[in-house]
Amino acid sequence: MADIIQLLPDSVANQIAAGEVIQRPASVVKELLENSIDAGATSVKLVVKDAGRTLIQVIDNGCGMSETDARMSFERHATSKIKAAADLFALHTKGFRGEALASMAAIAHVDLKTRRHDDELGTQIIMEGAEVISQEPVSTAAGTSFSIKNLFFNVPARRNFLKSNQVEMRHILEEFQRVALTHPEVEMVLLHNDNEVLNLPIGSLRQRVVGIFGKSHNQRLVPVDEATDIVRITGFVSKPEFARKTRGDQYFFVNRRFIKSNYLHHAIRNAFEGLIPSGHHPTYFLYLDIAPDAIDVNIHPTKTEIKFEDERAIYAIIRSAVRQSLGKYNIAPSLDFEQETSFNVSSKEPSELRAPAIHINPDYNPFESEKSTSSTASSTPAPKKESTKGWEEMYQISKDFDQATAAATEVEIEVEETTETTQQVISSNWDEQEKEATATRLTVQLHSRYILTSIKSGFMLLDQHRAHQRILFERLMNAMANQESSSQQQLFPETIELSASDFSLMKEMEEDITALGFDIAEFGKNTYVINGIPADAGDDSPVHLLEALLEQYKLNSDELKIDRREHLARVLSRNMAIKPGKHLGAMEMGQLVDELFGCEIPYYTPAGKPVVVTYTLEELEKRFEQ
Ligand code: ADP
Ligand code: MG
């Protein structure tokens, strides 16, 4: 039988390799940007069209390539960065595998223009599916420009696997940011569909962080700086009060390479222990400088994992460095751990706690006068009466008693009528006796948090925050379904400046947010102006509301497979709902109870938490039994 094993043609081998190196447009971005940095560029520009589907171009002012090198650069395992295996342990460059360009050429149309600074003419090479289409001298700026067009044109499976433009753009941004965060000495610009998304001039690391994530980061971060024999740690961590519920901006760089490490992440968490509530995450940008021979970066093809020779020591050093910084900058734990969302931390003082207002008149005697019988709960204090004796007075009392009974019957009749009208508003799942209670309702606020109200079969406790959440949620859902969200226009519209990635996320949500009653518009770079907010938003700050939506959206978008709008309505209702600690008047409480039981599902919050707890008379009797 004939031998059957043969060597794969280069084009096929490259395509297979490409599968590993280039998974999505963001992978191209990463490889090209890293090549530019390795080439010593001081200015790098990334131009993206349609989230990288049609074009990814990186233009740098680095060293450029000779004609031969330009051609060689597309060969697999062709690299200028290492020569022998030993070099792997002394890496100072980002690339070293010599695979990236070969891979790109196999699955896209590539247009390379490059010129070394001392050469007069440069070289242009056009590749398609690993074939050289043309190679010519060209007059071009010193440095290199790679254009990658029609990515995955010959790999339909990959192309179809791509997510929405917004998602792909987010990945691109993430890669761009990772490079930008390690090279503040390089000017970096990002354009998407001709819009300037980021423009980062050369500056300090702090300026770079602020340039990417927005000015608000400036006062949130404290520096970390610690040098030991085995590692030097620099960078920033967030002050504990700015910890968030999303595990968002957390960056570890080792020798200027972005890495992921749960182990080291744990070291930081550990340093923050006791300073932030559980479930919250600090922001950090930490840079480890370590001798190249003490790490192995070669264990993962996309190189975001790393092996340290002395992991435990590094853990301990990170932990103590972060602890020290937090201590040095005198950061006291000042958080309210009870907050339900990270967003609740508002500048406003919570309204002061008040004891429930129950007015009891110890001298109240229902037989005293007609007047007092008709007002039950909030009786006006009756003047103290001298003790009465004698027939006349006896007679008087008995007469009063009759009148009182008559008045009481009247009250009952009134109740019936009220119930009639209320009934129309109250939905069917609210049973008869409870409806009646709504009408004669006595409400008491307990600990500025719960509302106690009596029902015929006993009494109920409502969680005011959750009840309001349910009401707002259903209102928002209905409004969206009927496309009639009402919004209150802002007299002084606020602007919200976002990081580039949050900005693209906001764009993703814009339509839904508008449906909820927000009136927002793009307002310059990475900024939105908030012209209107949902009518029910109360006195919460519009910026806070939007931030909460973003935050929670990021947090839950991967976990919850519920409808996107429903999710937003949940988040928004939670943030708009009256908070625990807010004092409510009788009218407000009454309205809340009415509206709650006008809801489709009054007993649970949109997230399924109980809103109402009922105590029956039977239960109460049992508890009083000996
Ligand atoms: P690697 O970066 O692992 O060496 P690549 O396939 O990414 O492999 O690049 C191959 C070679 O092409 C590099 O080693 C470098 O010599 C050259 N090269 C790539 N991009 C640039 C650039 N922007 N400027 C100068 N040379 C470059
Ligand atoms: Mg490379």
Image (cartoon, rainbow, N blue to C red):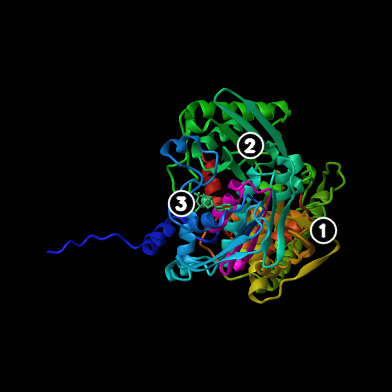
* Quarter of image, res 193: bottom right
Give the number of the disc on residue 78: 3
Q: Which residue is mark 1?
A: 494
- Relative vertical location of residue 245 with respect to residue 197 in this rendering, above or below: above
Give the number of the disc on residue 92: none
Instruction: Measure the C-alpha gap from mark 3 to mark 2.
Output: 49 Å
Q: Which residue is mark 2?
A: 276
Q: Is residue 460 visible?
A: no
In the image, is residue 124 part of the stretch drawn in magenta? no
Q: Amino acid at mark 3?
A: Ala
Pick the residue in front: 128 or 311: 128
Magenta part of the chain: 28-57
Pick the residue in front: 344 or 521: 521
Q: Position of residue 334 (x, y in %)?
A: 71, 34
Give the label, 3 or 2, closer to the camera.
3
Earlier-in-chain disc, 3 versus 2: 3
